[in-house]
Image: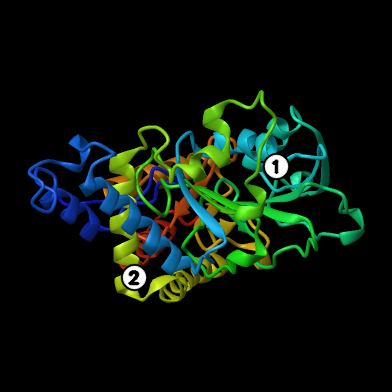
Amino acid sequence: MNRVYNFSAGPSVLPEEVLETARDEMLNWHGSGMSVMEMSHRSKWYDEIIKKAETDLRDLMNIPSNYKVLFLQGGAWTQFAMVPMNLMKKGKADYVNTGSWSKKAISEARKYGKVNVVASSEDAGFTYIPELNPETFSRDADYFYITTNNTIYGTRYTKLPETGNVSLVADMSSNILSEVYDVTKFGLIFAGAQKNMGPAGVTVVIIREDLISDVQPEVPTMLQYKVHAENSSLFNTPPCYSIYICGLVFEWLKKLGGVPAMQKINEEKAAILYDFLDNSKMFKGTVRKEDRSLMNVPFVTGDKDLDARFVKEAEQKGLVNLKGHRSVGGMRASIYNAMPVEGVKKLVEFMKEFEAKNRI
C-alpha cells in the first residue's frame, strides 16, 4: 500500500528514512541480538542510545552546558503541573493566554500559586498573538510562561517577550526543532515528542541548572526535576523505544543540515500553502498574517457542508487528517518537519481542483 500524506496534528508524520531504519533494526539493534523494545534501560546498549540522543539534541539546538536535557513522561499535561510545582518558590507567575493549551496550563498553575494573565487573545478566538506590555509583567514573578506555537489555532510567536530577570518558560510542543531558537533566552523549554521529534510517550525538558533545586517535600518524587536531572533521565524506566526513535529523528535532522536548514524548508512549505489561501476565492486562512504558524495551518470555506466534503474527498486522494480541531471546525494542515514539500504541493493541487469543481 502506498503511504498517504498525513497532515495530523499529532501523533504526526515521521520521516520515512527513520521508519525504515527502525524497521531494519527492529529485531537486532547493532548486533545486540535484541530489539530496543526488549533492552534494559540500564544496559550498555541503551546507555549508548540515550546519551547519543541527548548529544544530538544539544548539537541541534545549541544547548549550553549549564542546561540539563531530560527525557520524561506524561506529556505537556504533566508539565503544566510540574512547572509550578518546581518553579513557584514565591508563589507567583505570569502567563500569556494564546489558546487551549495555555488555558489548561493556567488552570493547573492556579492550584499552586497566583497566576497573572498578562495578555490574552481569547477575544478573537485565539486567531492572533497579543501585544505584550512590559508594564503588566510581575517583576517578582517566579517565571513567565508562553506557548510558542498554538497547534489548534495556528498562531506562533515571531518575537519573544523580554522578561528581564524573570525566567521564560515555553511549551514548545508543536514547533520544537522547526525554527532556530536561542535556548539561553529561556529558563525552561518542554515539548511532547509526538509532533516534531518522535512517537508519543516521551516529553523533552530543557532546564537551566539554577532552576533545579530542592522543592517542597510534598511534591511527589516523580514530579521533581532535580530527581530526574540527578539520575540522567533514568530514575525509573524511561519510554525507551520513543527516545530511540527521537534519536533517529535527530540524526535525520543533522544530515539535512540541522535546524537552520529545516527552518528554510518549513518556510517554503508554509509559503506555498499561505500563498494559495491568500489568493483563493473559496478557502480562507483564519489567522492574522503576522502571527501565522509554520507548523499548523487552519483554513475554512465558510460552509460546513463544503468543509466536510473537502475533508472526505481529500482522504480519497491520500491527503489524510485534514479535519480541524473539534473546538474550531474547518480544516487544518499540520506540516511538521517530516511532511515533505511534495505533500504540501499535492494538497494545494487538490485544493485548486476542489475549488474549480465547487465554485458557487
Residue 96 horizontal/vertical position (percent): 75, 49
Q: Secondary structure at mark 1?
A: helix
Q: Does 275 sit above or below residue 134?
A: below
| 313 left or right, relative to 96 | left
Please name the residue that numbered disc 2 is placed on. Answer: 254
Residue 116 horizontal/vertical position (percent): 84, 42
Q: Which mark is residue 87?
A: 1
| 267 left or right, relative to 345 | right
Q: Nearer the viewer, mark 2 or mark 1?
A: 1
Q: Which mark is residue 11?
A: none
Colour mode of the rendering? rainbow
Asked whether residue 8 is in view, the answer is yes
- The first of marks 2 and 1 along the sequence is 1
Residue 199 falls in which quadrant of the image? top left
Residue 9 horizontal/vertical position (percent): 45, 46
What residue is drawn where x is 81% and y is 44%?
A: 117
Residue 160 horizontal/vertical position (percent): 70, 64
Q: Foreground residue, 277 or 165?
A: 165
